[in-house]
Amino acid sequence: MKIALIKETKVPIDNRVAFSPKQMAQLQNDYPEHQFVVQRSDVRAFADEEYQDAGLALVENVDNCDILFGIKEAQIDTLIPNKHYIFFGHIAKMQAYNRPLLQAFIRKGITFTDYEYMVDDAGVRVCAFGWWAGIVGVYYTLRGYGLRHNLYQLPKPDKRFTLDELKTALQSAALPNIKILVTGNGRVSQGAQYILDAIGAQRLSEAEFLSTNNVSHLSYTVADVDKLVKRSNGEAFSWPHFTKCASEYQSDFMRWGTAADILVCAHFWAPEAPVYLSEEDLRNPQLRIKMIGDVTCDIQGSVKSTLRSSTHDEPYFDYNPQSATEEEAFSSNNNITVMAVDTCPNALAMDTSAYFGDMLIQYVMPGLLSGNHSEVVLRGTILDKGKLTPRFAYLEDFANGK
């Protein structure tokens, strides 16, 4: 087979890649019966010359390739019929904005595998950027806090910004003695906790966080959903019950909202779950939070100040709690500043690409390239030659515009 690393065509541009130059060279060495090529691109964190120097062939088009690896959705007019594409498709949750992409897959007889649904036998994703999203989310949020209060300046990441540079920047800044609430306990939250620990932030217990108004160090705590909601009938929180009956719970967030200076949203949220911060809550004069980093970027979801996603070029906007509308970032002390970049890992494109490529090489490529049956790949395959696979047959009505 001939395997290509394709040029990213989505706007805003993503600088990440599925494989670094070193990893592509490793694949070519490990699988000499296949050919690996790189489509020329001027947007990758890694330059074309770095792939060429690693021994890879650079090509203008990939019409004669069999498997095409990207990161984000390819533009419809670039799709080549009867090929196997692998990238993040954002169609399996019936995202209306990508219905035309699904329809194009069907029309063009394309096989499509989505990284998000590549899982192991235990149902755990094998290729994900969540941990890195938490790291960058904290960085952007602290950067925004410094800009809002004119306290310090953190550099704006370029496409070759690294984790080491990020750590150094944070460790060198005069970060204030404030309290940060990190929600959730999955990969995104774990990444947020990692970087806070790495820069010397002090972790507080729930009791310490809620009872202490002023702290002598940059401090944080972590609250998972069982600490963010309470059962409406007064009974104790139950995970099994919550997963089935989330509507029977209500927000218990304001006890955190009156204690935290910064909120970093790193939790999973579903529409049937309670809203943590409603428009009314955001107007509450007792709300202490003036900076929100919504890393999970649930638009108008659990935190109603997330009116839209933001970009790496313009990561911040202000939320006016009185009018529930957007205003220019840092325009009023009465506003709440929001960071809602929905592609945070792209700020560390080289590091995250290498991490992602390692996961692909370990969990995906052996089965994909050996010709043997690969459950990981099959679980993530939404269409096979333009036909919905049984696991994703529920998308038929969506594909038909219903």
Image: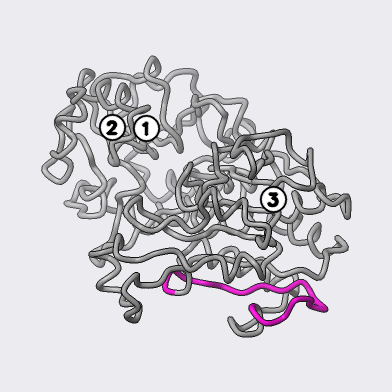
Pointer 3 or 1: first along the chain: 1
Q: Check disc 2 and report the residue beneath it.
A: 84
Of residues 50 and 108, the one drawn nearer to the viewer in this rendering: 108
Tell me the crowding category of disc 1: few under 14, some 14 to 19, or many 20 or more residues within 10 angstroms, Cα based: many
Q: Quadrant of the C terminus?
A: top left
- Residue 304, x across and y down, in percent: 52, 47
* Mark 3: amino acid: Tyr
Indicate the amino acid at tag 2: His
Task: Say which mark, if any, is on residue 68.
Answer: 1
Let me know if residue 387 is in the magenta part. Answer: no
- Mark 3 or mark 2, whichever is nearer to me: 3
Q: Residues within 10 Å of mark 3 (few under 14, many from 20)?
A: many
- In the image, taking residue 279 as reference, residue 166 lies left or right, namely right
Q: Measured from the top left, where is residue 65 in percent x and y? A: 34, 26
Label 2 vs label 1: CA separation?
6 Å
Quick one: SS at disc 1?
A: strand
Which residue is denoted by mark 3 in the rendering?
140
Q: Verify CB contact (< 8 Å) between mark 2 and mark 1.
A: yes
Which badge, 2 or 1, comes first in the chain's sequence?
1
Which residue is pictured at 64% across the width and 48% down the height? 348
Between discs 3 and 2, the one toward the N terminus: 2
Q: Which region shows up in magenta?
A: 210-226
Q: Is residue 122 left or right of residue 70?
A: left
Nearer to me, 401 or 353: 401
